[in-house]
Image (cartoon, coloured by chain):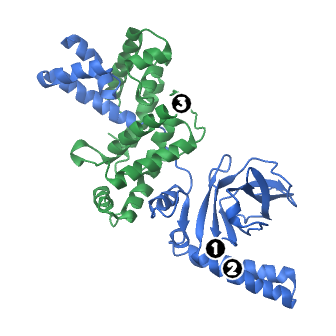
Chain colours: A green, B blue
């Protein structure tokens, strides 16, 4: 984003006032980001695009409003997308699935430089965290990914995996505790 | 739930993975427990990291244009847009005009110089002029040509249409692209075309019926000379 281009807040304000060009400018900036999250949850090119467009339509219609006091815009829009994609996953009655290592079927890998925002360090840390997740024991990684990208709660995880409730709660807690420690010790480049 | 139990579910709560009764217990406990609030900050930072950890991928080509079409007035249904909504980019309108002119002139050359054919070319030129008041329909990419895109421009009276394709894969020798028009599940050939080295191509649709009779369109790769029915997967397609 060059110095001459409006920032995200300005574009959001304009789009809320009915400026479709402003909304499309945000779309152009963030479509890859939103699509990446939608595709990660849904693993379907068509559904991921549908959800991507739905997220921007909701912003356009004012159903979703960003509050800068709550954090980065990228985090906000990713959270909105994750919930929208999980909702769609449930409506389509599809099964959430963990990401296979190095699997990119349906998605052309994007360069981090092409992701939006001036702070590319947040993407570097995200990529590093992804590598840390891959180092978790398989059963812990599985519950973590199903919980986060599949939107499953403790009880839903137990039912989905046909495991005792205490087992899934323990695995999820251990996974998150390990990641917290690893990530604090080594957050990756960019910090 | 006691403090020791709450501490154990704080990580899951930060992810939104707690059951309803656990969520309620955490939220009741937090106002009175600074330790739990501090721990929650840590795990929310971790959740933010997870949000940015989804492997970044490129959205399908043309996604912003399809968003633009979706934002247009309700008279345009999804995937449709007016002629000018597709030609807002300054370079595209003159490029397309030149391409259409070349197509008309090429048709004139190959058909000969009889008075009847000259009249037909004049009719075609008039039909192309009618495209300015027409509608545009997007043809979306399907694997493996996920970066290809097509647009069918239909004239206002629906009798003339032009297919423009972008980003189509290079054809092997002995192959051609074939457009199919779909009516009641039956595919009728809409014409054959090739593409330039950068995947750009044009085709004036050939159809024996009013375009309004067809519900969909798609493009496949066929042997040179075309096929009576599709013999390969659809590369781009959409509803008319």
Q: Residue at x 53, y 27 (%)?
A: A95
- Residue at image mark 1: B155
Q: Is residue A25 above or below residue B21?
A: below
Between A4 and B62, the one lying in front of the other is B62
Residue contact at pointers 2 and 1, CB within 8 angstroms: yes
Which of pointers 3 and 1 indicates the residue nearer the eye?
1
Q: Which residue is mark 3?
A: A94
Q: Chain of mark 1?
A: B
Secondary structure category for the residue under label 3: loop
**Residues under numbered marks 3 and 2 in contact, where contact means CB atoms less than 8 Å apart:** no
- Report which residue position mark 2 lands on: B127
Q: Which quadrant, please, contains the N terminus of chain B?
A: top left
- Seen at 24% across and 48% down, the residue is A68
- Residue B194, picture quadrant: bottom right
The chain letter for the residue carrying disc 2 is: B
Q: Is A99 positioned to the left or the right of B209 in the image?
A: left
Where's residue A136, x and y in %?
45, 20
């Amino acid at each position: 984003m060059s110095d001459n281009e409006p920032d995200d807040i300005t574009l959001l304000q304009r789009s809320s006032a009915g400026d479709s060009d402003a909304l499309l400018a945000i779309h152009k900036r963030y479509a890859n980001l939103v699509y990446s999250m939608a595709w990660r949850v849904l693993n379907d090119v068509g559904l991921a695009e549908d959800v991507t467009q739905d997220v921007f339509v909701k912003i356009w219609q004012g159903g979703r409003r960003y509050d800068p006091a709550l954090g980065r815009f990228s985090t906000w829009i990713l959270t909105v997308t994750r919930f929208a994609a999980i909702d769609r996953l449930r409506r389509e009655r599809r099964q959430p699935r963990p990401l296979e290592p190095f699997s990119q079927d349906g998605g052309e890998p994007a360069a981090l430089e092409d992701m939006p925002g001036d702070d590319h360090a947040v993407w570097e840390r995200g990529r590093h965290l992804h590598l840390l997740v891959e180092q978790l024991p398989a059963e812990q990684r599985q519950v973590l990914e199903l919980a986060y990208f599949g939107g499953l709660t403790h009880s839903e995880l137990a039912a989905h995996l046909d495991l005792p409730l205490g087992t899934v709660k323990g695995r999820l807690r251990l996974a998150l505790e390990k990641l917290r420690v690893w990530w604090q010790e080594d957050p990756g480049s960019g910090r | 739930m006691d403090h020791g139990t709450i501490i154990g579910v704080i990580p899951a709560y930060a992810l939104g993975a707690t059951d309803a009764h656990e969520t309620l217990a955490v939220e009741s406990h937090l106002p009175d427990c600074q330790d739990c609030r501090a721990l929650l900050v840590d795990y929310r930072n971790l959740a933010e990291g997870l949000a940015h950890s989804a492997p970044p991928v490129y959205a399908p080509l043309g996604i912003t244009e399809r968003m633009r079409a979706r934002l247009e007035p309700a008279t345009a249904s999804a995937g449709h847009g007016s002629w000018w909504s597709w030609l807002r980019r300054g370079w595209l309108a003159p490029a397309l005009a030149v391409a259409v002119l070349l197509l008309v002139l090429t048709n004139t050359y190959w058909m000969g110089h009889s008075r009847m054919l000259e009249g037909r070319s004049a009719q075609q030129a008039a039909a192309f002029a009618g495209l300015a008041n027409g509608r545009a329909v997007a043809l979306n990419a399907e694997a493996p040509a996920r970066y290809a895109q097509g647009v069918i421009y239909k004239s206002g009276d629906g009798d003339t249409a032009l297919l423009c394709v972008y980003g189509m894969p290079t054809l092997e020798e002995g192959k051609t692209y074939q457009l199919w028009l779909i009516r009641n599940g039956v595919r009728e050939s809409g014409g054959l075309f090739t593409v330039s080295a950068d995947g750009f191509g044009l085709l004036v649709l050939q159809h024996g019926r009013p375009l309004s009779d067809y519900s969909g369109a798609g493009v496949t790769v066929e042997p040179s000379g075309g096929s009576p029915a599709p013999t390969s997967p659809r590369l781009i397609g959409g509803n008319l």
